[in-house]
Image (cartoon, grey):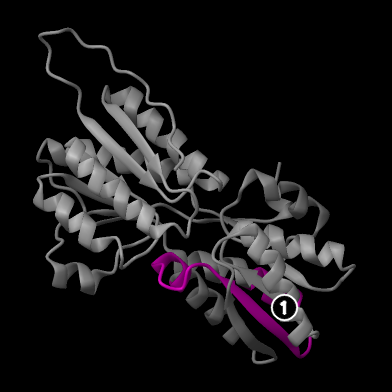
Amino acid sequence: MFESVEAPTPHSADAEPPIRVALVMKTLTNPFFIEMERGARRAERELGIQLVVKTAAQETSIQEQVQIIDALILEKVDAIVIAPGDSVELIPPLKRAQDAGIIIINIDNRLDADLSKKSGLKDVPYVGVDNEKGGYLSAMELVRRLTGPNEAAILEGIPTSQNSVDRVAGAQRAFAENPQIELVLIQSAHWKIDEGYEVTREILAQFPNIKALFCANDMMALGAVQYLQDAGMQGVLVAGYDNLSEVQDALKQGALVATIDQQAAEQGYLGVQYAVRALKNETLPAETLVDVQLVTASSLP
């Protein structure tokens, strides 16, 4: 399990101990979450709290996130700000945390609303983006560049993650707006660069005429781009999602058509800020959406 070093908060012996807010993310192997922590650290400095950062080894390490939450309950942190790896499986441990009096703030990937209600997990503010809109904007850049009949495919993340579901829905809507585009396959690469590589290879072996590939995050897109380059395949347009610094060269070179900036640092910042506000009994909005921004080669500095 990866864990970043906590920044100590000085206080005198007779002072109140600092508020302890835990930021639980999926991994630090994806630069998106490094940016998220950066925003959370800014809130830590501004608010004078103690931030405890915990991550699982990989984005698919759902049970590790469950174990992290249970450990934080025992540590009696004041609040948990979580970017859940799964929209369903994290609900029971978060309910246990809430029952223990810990404030819960949901960021990045939305928890399943119906199961949350059935489980009794309530009043959990959400800070994130309109992922359906982001998926639509990214995939529409593919649609705009295609002429005539074409086949397209989608690489989704973890199928039970709501952010993946929403991004895929947005891409499907974009492809559906052009009746000459046939969406032939949706397949998971679990957010990973190596799986993005392998799944792209498998898809193109099965559907060699695919000309457009929407990837629900940049890590999978980087894997797809790398496979296309290694295979010497040209004419397949790829779009991603996250605006990692690692995709800038691919955008400039035309290997990647578009990506989406969902302001990871701002999500981390607002998540911690909301946790502190909730601890002060302030009323918070049920949902706060950060703007998504389309990024293409022409929009880069």
Q: Nearer the viewer, residue 138 or 27?
A: 27
Say above or below: 167 vs 194: below
Tell me: 79 left or right of 297: left
Say above or below: 161 vs 181: above
Q: Residue at x 12, y 41 (%)?
A: 282
Q: Which picture quadrant has residue 93?
A: bottom left
Queried whether the magenta region covers residue 116, the answer comes back as no
Q: Residues within 10 Å of mark 1 (few under 14, many from 20)?
A: few
Residue 286 visible in the current orientation: no
Q: Residue at x 60, y 51 (%)?
A: 243
Magenta-tinted stretch:
140-165
Q: Residue at x 43, y 51 (%)?
A: 26
Instruction: Name the residue that disc number 1 marks.
Output: 202
Q: Residue furthest right?
A: 232
**Residue 276 location (% of width, % of height):** 21, 35
Q: Which picture quadrant has residue 240?
A: bottom right
Queried whether the magenta region covers residue 154, the answer comes back as yes
**Residue 262 location (% of width, % of height):** 49, 52
